[in-house]
C-alpha cells in the first residue's frame, strides 16, 4: 500500500504544482535576481495585424480603436486579414481604407496562423502588434508596447487582457478569474526571466524575429517560444491594456479551450528543443511547469481518483479524503450542469471552470494522439 500511497500523493502534487508550487518557486527566484525590463519612450514604425473571421459585430469598433491610438499616424500601419469571412466583415473594413487601413482577404479559409503569415508579408513596421478582432486597446497601449522594445534583450511583449461584461455567467466569471491568475503568473515569470504563452489578442514582436508559423499551430504560443530560442526575452507589461467580452456560453468556452490546448500541445512538439534543460535552463523549466504538466493534469486527476478509491478501502483517512474528493467533483459538476441561482454559482465557478478546462485538456490529448487538427476558429460568443 505504501507504493499506492506514494503514487496518490505524487498525482496530487502534480495537479497542484503548476498552480501553486511553480509560482512560489519563480516568485522566490525573481525576488533574489529580478529580471528587470529597461523600458523607454520611443516611436518606431508599427504594424497592427488583425485576423478576422465573420467579425461583423465587432470589427468596426476594433478598427476605429486602433485608428484612435495615441501614436503618430505616419508610423502606424493597420492590416486586417479576413480569413474567408462571409458576413460582411470585409465591407465594413473597406469603409476605413480611406484612413489607411489595409484589407487582405485569405481564400480559402486557413486559420489565424496562415492569416498572420500572409499579413506580415505586407507589414512595414519595425514592431508587429497582434490584436484579436474584438480586442479594444487602451489608448496608450501601443506606446507602452514599443517602450519595452527599447530594451535590446526583449523580443516579444504581451499585455494585460481584461474580460468585461460577463453578466454573472459561470463561463464569464470563470474566464475572468482564469485570466487574472494568468496575468499574475506572467508578471512572476517576467521577473524570473521570460513568460511561456501570451495573450494572443494583445501581443507584439520585433519584425526581424517573426517567422512563418505552420497553419495548424498556435501563433501566440509558438512565436514566443521561437523568440526564446533565438536568445531574446518574452515579457509581460500590465500597462498594455486590452478589453474583451468573455464567452457567455460554456460550450463555446470549452470548444475554445480544447482548440487552444491541442494547438499548444502540437506547438510543444514543434518546439521540443526548448524542453531540454541543458540548452535552455530557465525556459525549459517554465515550459515544463507552466504548460506540459498543466496539460497532463487530466491524467493525474484520473490517477488520483482511482488511487483514492483503492486506498479508501483500507484506510479511514483516505476514506475521508475520498468523500472530500467526491464533494469537490459534485460541486464542480453542479455548476456545469445544474441551473443554480447566481449566488450559488459564485461558490462553485472556480472548481466548475477548472473541471471544464481539464476536460478540454483531456479531449485535446485524445485529439493529439489521433493526429487531429483544429486550425480554424469561431468568433467568441459574448
Image (cartoon, helix red, strand yellow):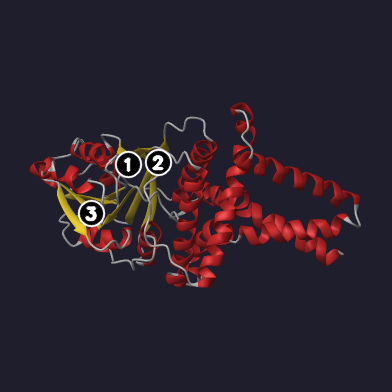
Real-space Cα distance between discs 3 and 1?
15 Å
Residue sitting at x 52%, y 39%: 177
Tell me residue 105's x, y (percent).
19, 57
Q: Nearer the viewer, mark 1 or mark 2?
A: 1
The local crowd at label 3, few if under 14, some if 14 to 19, many if 20 or more residues have their Cα within 10 Å, is many
Q: Quick one: which residue is furthest to the left in this view?
A: 98
Q: Earlier in the sequence, mark 1 or mark 2?
A: 1
Real-space Cα distance between discs 3 and 2?
22 Å
Q: Which mark is residue 356?
A: none
Q: Are marks 1 and 2 in contact (CB under 8 Å)?
A: yes
Above/below status of 36 relative to 2: above
Q: Nearer the viewer, residue 217 or 210?
A: 217
Q: Can residue 34 be seen in this view?
A: no
Q: Residue 81 carries which label?
A: 3
Q: Which residue matches tag 2?
A: 161
Q: Nearer the viewer, residue 380 or 143?
A: 380
Above/below status of 18 relative to 269: above
Amino acid at each position: 500500500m505504501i507504493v499506492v500511497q506514494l503514487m496518490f500523493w505524487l498525482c496530487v502534487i502534480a495537479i497542484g504544482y503548476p498552480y501553486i508550487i511553480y509560482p512560489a518557486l519563480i516568485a522566490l527566484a525573481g525576488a533574489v535576481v529580478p529580471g528587470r525590463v529597461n523600458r523607454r519612450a520611443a516611436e518606431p514604425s508599427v504594424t497592427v495585424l488583425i485576423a478576422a473571421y465573420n467579425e461583423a459585430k465587432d470589427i468596426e469598433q476594433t478598427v476605429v480603436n486602433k485608428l484612435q491610438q495615441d501614436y503618430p499616424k505616419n508610423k502606424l500601419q493597420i492590416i486586417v486579414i479576413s480569413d474567408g469571412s462571409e458576413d460582411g466583415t470585409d465591407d465594413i473594413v473597406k469603409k476605413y481604407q480611406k484612413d489607411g487601413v489595409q484589407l487582405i482577404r485569405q481564400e480559402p479559409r486557413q486559420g489565424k496562423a496562415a492569416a498572420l503569415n500572409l499579413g506580415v508579408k505586407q507589414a512595414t513596421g519595425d514592431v508587429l502588434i497582434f490584436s484579436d478582432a474584438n480586442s479594444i486597446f487602451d489608448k496608450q497601449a501601443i506606446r507602452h508596447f514599443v517602450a519595452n522594445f527599447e530594451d535590446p534583450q526583449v523580443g516579444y511583449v504581451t499585455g494585460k487582457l481584461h474580460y468585461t461584461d460577463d453578466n454573472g455567467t459561470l463561463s464569464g466569471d470563470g474566464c475572468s478569474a482564469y485570466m487574472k491568475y494568468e496575468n499574475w503568473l506572467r508578471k512572476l515569470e517576467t521577473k524570473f526571466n521570460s513568460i511561456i504563452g501570451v495573450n494572443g489578442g494583445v501581443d507584439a514582436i520585433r519584425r526581424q524575429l517573426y517567422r512563418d508559423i505552420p497553419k495548424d499551430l498556435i501563433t501566440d504560443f509558438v512565436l514566443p517560444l521561437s523568440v526564446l530560442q533565438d536568445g531574446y526575452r518574452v515579457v509581460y507589461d500590465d500597462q498594455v491594456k486590452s478589453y474583451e467580452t468573455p464567452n457567455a456560453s460554456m460550450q463555446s468556452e470549452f470548444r475554445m479551450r480544447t482548440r487552444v490546448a491541442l494547438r499548444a500541445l502540437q506547438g510543444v512538439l514543434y518546439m521540443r528543443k526548448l524542453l531540454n534543460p541543458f540548452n535552455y535552463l530557465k525556459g525549459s523549466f517554465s515550459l515544463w511547469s507552466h504548460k506540459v504538466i498543466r496539460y497532463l493534469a487530466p491524467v493525474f486527476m484520473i490517477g488520483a481518483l482511482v488511487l483514492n478509491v483503492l486506498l479508501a478501502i483500507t484506510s479511514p483517512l483516505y476514506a475521508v479524503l475520498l468523500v472530500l474528493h467526491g464533494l469537490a467533483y459534485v460541486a464542480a459538476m453542479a455548476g456545469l450542469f445544474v441551473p443554480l441561482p447566481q449566488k450559488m454559482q459564485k461558490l462553485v465557478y472556480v472548481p466548475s471552470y477548472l473541471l471544464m478546462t481539464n476536460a478540454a485538456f483531456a479531449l485535446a490529448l485524445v485529439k493529439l494522439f489521433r493526429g487531429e487538427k483544429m486550425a480554424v476558429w469561431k468568433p467568441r460568443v459574448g
